[in-house]
Amino acid sequence: MSLSALYDLPAPAKLNLFLHVTGRRADGYHLLQSLFVLIDWCDTLHLECRPDGQLHRHDLGPTLPADDLCLRAARLLQQASGTPLGVDIHILKRIPSEAGMGGGSSDAATVLLGLNRLWRLNWPRQRLLELGARLGADVPFFIGGHNALVEGIGEILTPVTLPPHRFAVLKPMVSAPTAKIFAHPLVKRDTPRVIVSVLLQAMRENKHSTLDTLSADSLNPESWHVMWGRNDLQSATEAICPDVEKAKKVLAAQFKHARMTGSGSAVFASLEGTDRFEVATFKGFIPEQWIGQVCSSMSSHPLVDWAS
């Protein structure tokens, strides 16, 4: 019996616990090294199969661009698989756009995982990863399904196990233009690569229980706190979008440390060691029209078992 629809599919956001720019390829793409963690701030998608091959998207919340990553993901999978089927994609956006939280990429990954099942393709995860890499640097991470050290241009994934954690996330109204950020002279493009084996060993020894050393620059293997490093895009983003620095200060005033995630305008702070009253009053510190939320980390993507 064929499936006709899949409802309430989650598309979780992510945070970059650190983001280092380690170089630049001849084609202009920047080489990155970052630690991605899934959080429970999610978009929701519903997929309804169409026999006529047409692809349509229906916005249940904010209006998205006419040809967004969801439709591009569906079109790419349809063309690659040769299926005659189509889909109606209904999407409720909750993750703010241009925040550096991977919302659009996560939506695309959920579409690929969902359509793989809805269209009865049964593709292995590796084939979906290859398609995802063609859509955007963050898409493979969400298809991979696990918190991960991400390298290259986003295609090299090393799954990691992280303890449960909570974060305060704050997004100012301003949006940060990714291309302008990467082109800015304040971006450091030669950060030495963290030695993966050293980082993973530090994690196994439970030396990652604090984010108190967010500004660490040393890459000495004896300095385990380097795993949290920094965001090499933050200075440039703050220069372009002063509200990002303001958001960082709002969070840091309440939770000690804060930093930008990804290449967007959202910032986050660890809630480790924070009492319930401080967390409960978090939204009282948020400027009008800014978006803020307390989030928990996820050990894996809710659809991790949808591809082998």
Image: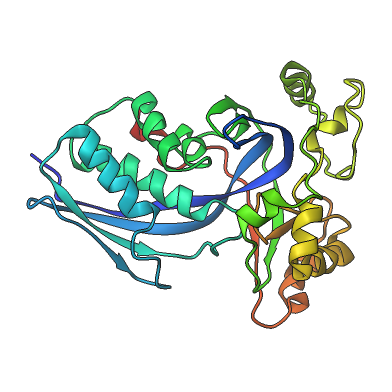
Q: Provide residue 80's location: percent of width, then percent of height.
A: 24, 34
Where residue 187 sits in the image (x, y, percent)? Answer: 78, 46
Residue 17, relative to residue 23: is it above or below? below
Which sits in the foreground, 299 or 275?
299
Q: In which quarter of the image is residue 91?
A: bottom left
Q: Horizontal and vertical percent for residue 44?
A: 40, 59
| Figure quadrant of the C terminus | top left
125 left or right of 36 in image: left
Q: Residue at x 66, y 49 (%)?
A: 262
Q: Can residue 269 be seen in this view?
A: no
Q: Quadrant of residue 143?
A: top left
Q: Where is residue 294 in the image (x, y as percent from the top left)?
A: 66, 61
- What is the number of callouts on the image? 0
Q: Is residue 145 visible?
A: yes
| View extreme (bottom): residue | 288
The quadrant in which the N terminus is found is: top left
Quarter of image, res 162:
top right
Image position of 304 (left or right of 189)? left
Looking at the image, which residue is at 86% across and 27% down?
224
Residue 286 sits above or below residue 214 on the image? below
Above or below: residue 58 compared with residue 214:
below
Q: Is residue 178 left or right of residue 271?
A: left
Residue lying at the far top in this picture: please name it. Answer: 197
| 39 relative position to 108: left or right | right
**Most foreground residue, 43 or 19:** 19
